[in-house]
Image (spheres, rainbow, N blue to C red):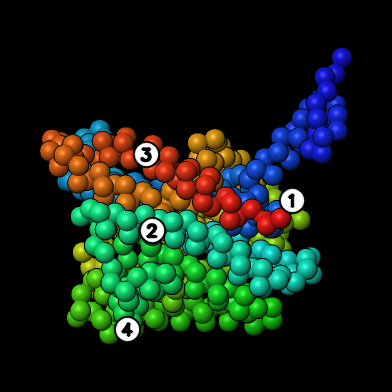
Amino acid sequence: MKSTQLDAVGKVASSTPYTESRLRYATLSRIMSPLIDHAAYRRDYLRSLTGLRGVAALWVLLYHAWVFSTPRLIQFDLLGIPLDVTPLFSAGFVGVDLFFVLSAYLLGARFFRWIEGRGSRPDLAQYFVRRIRRIYPAYLVQLLLLLLLAATTTLYTMPDGVSLLAHLFFYFNLPPLWVTQLNGVWWTLPTEFYFYLLLPLLVLLLRGKTTRWLILAVIAASIGYRYWVFVRFHDLGIAWMSVLMGNTLGYLDGFSLGLLASWLSVRLENRPLPPRLMDGLFVVGSGGILLSIWILHWTYPEYWDGHPVLFLRNIMIAGSSCLVVMATRHGSPLAKILLANRFIFFCGVVSYSLYLWQLPLIQALSKTSFFTNYQGYALGAYLVIATPLTLLLAWLSYRFVELPFLRKPR
């Protein structure tokens, strides 16, 4: 005899495997729809893509834990052969590249469906409101808390009136103010937010027959901008170059590749793609990311002196990331195993708040007596303590700050 249960609208439904699966999916969709940047575009929703955001955020956390630990060279012997695994830790900033590619890929999909005649024209006003609601609430709450710490402790320096105004509008390290942000990871927020403003225009470049040339021109302009920064500001040091190359213009090539991948995915979404092919694409993309970070590691002594990798790093990392994202989007079983499990999926759900809170927490831990007096290599201790605490803070920020603003107003 079949048991019964209430369906999504409160009616009694048969408890067959099919209906149970649909009920679980409907419940998950209602819970998860506000969590993802592209919640309005349900066809783009994939548990594995959310998990990929979790991997990106965790990689950034791993990187900052490594930064606060010494020695930074991580090497061990494998069958008598020295194996240097430092790039797995030192290249945690690649998580930021993954975030950028995912944003371009996911947000571009709705526009490309409109271009392909498969959907309605996106409402730009609604689009911009969603972007503001996605980023600002959690950021502003954190800003208020850090200002409170600056006023009551020595962990942070209280900004002056001009700097505070710059913080309110994401105007970090840009001329003529050159304001340094309270939280070191905030530099990515204006980089991504200004891309949101450019995205509708960039998408329109993909409408005509000259698509490939226009996008290639945008990519070339971004590489050219990085070269100009190197020539113009090399004498002022690495800090100036890294700041100026870290804005939207410096990453526009990576964003553009994410848009190209999104456009291709929209064209392929109604075609069956072999799972083995998608697994192969996932492996190639992952291998490309690993190869890129080892190349960055090997070339670092000459990197800021004008090595070609300085100008091509975004192409290398973003191009490989696009392969991973597309394979994940189109059903790679391997991606599902690695990225759709509960822990990684949860990290993806709270990835934005996880990204915001990991560095302030690690900085605070580094000033405690436990870590100032720590004997031995502190990386493991940082990860054991910081990871659960950061996840807790991320969940609280998501649950009580992000979620109320991400839900559609009644």
Quadrant in which the C terminus appears: bottom right
Q: Alpha-carbon distance for marks 3 and 1? A: 42 Å
Of marks 1 and 4, the one in the foreground: 4
Q: Amino acid at mark 4?
A: Pro
- For the point 40% across and 56% down, the residue is 142
Q: Position of residue 387 (x, y in %)?
A: 37, 39
| Count of numbered tags | 4
Residue 327 visible: no
- Disc number for residue 176: 4
Read off the residue under disc 2: 144
Assess disc 2: are there few (<14), some (14-19) or many (≥20) residues with their C-alpha within 10 Å of its C-alpha. Answer: few
For disc 3, the marked residue is 389
**Residue type (three-letter) at the residue carrying disc 2:** Leu
Residue type at mark 3?
Answer: Leu
C-alpha separation, residue under disc 2 versus residue under disc 3: 20 Å
Write down the residue under mark 1: 272
Residue at image point 38% right, 50% down = 357
| Vertical comparison of 353 with 334: above or below | below
- The nearer-to-camera label among 3 and 1 is 3
Near mark 3 (Cα within 10 A), the count class, few <14, some 14-19 or many ≥20, is some
* Mark 1 vs mark 4, CA separation in Å: 52 Å
Q: Quadrant of residue 246?
A: bottom left
The amino acid type found where label 1 is placed reads Pro
Q: Residues within 10 Å of mark 1 (few under 14, many from 20)?
A: few
Q: Quadrant of residue 229?
A: bottom left
- The residue lying at 32 percent from left, 47 percent from top is 361
- Say which label, 4 or 3, has the lower sequence index: 4
- Helix, strand, or loop for circle 2? helix
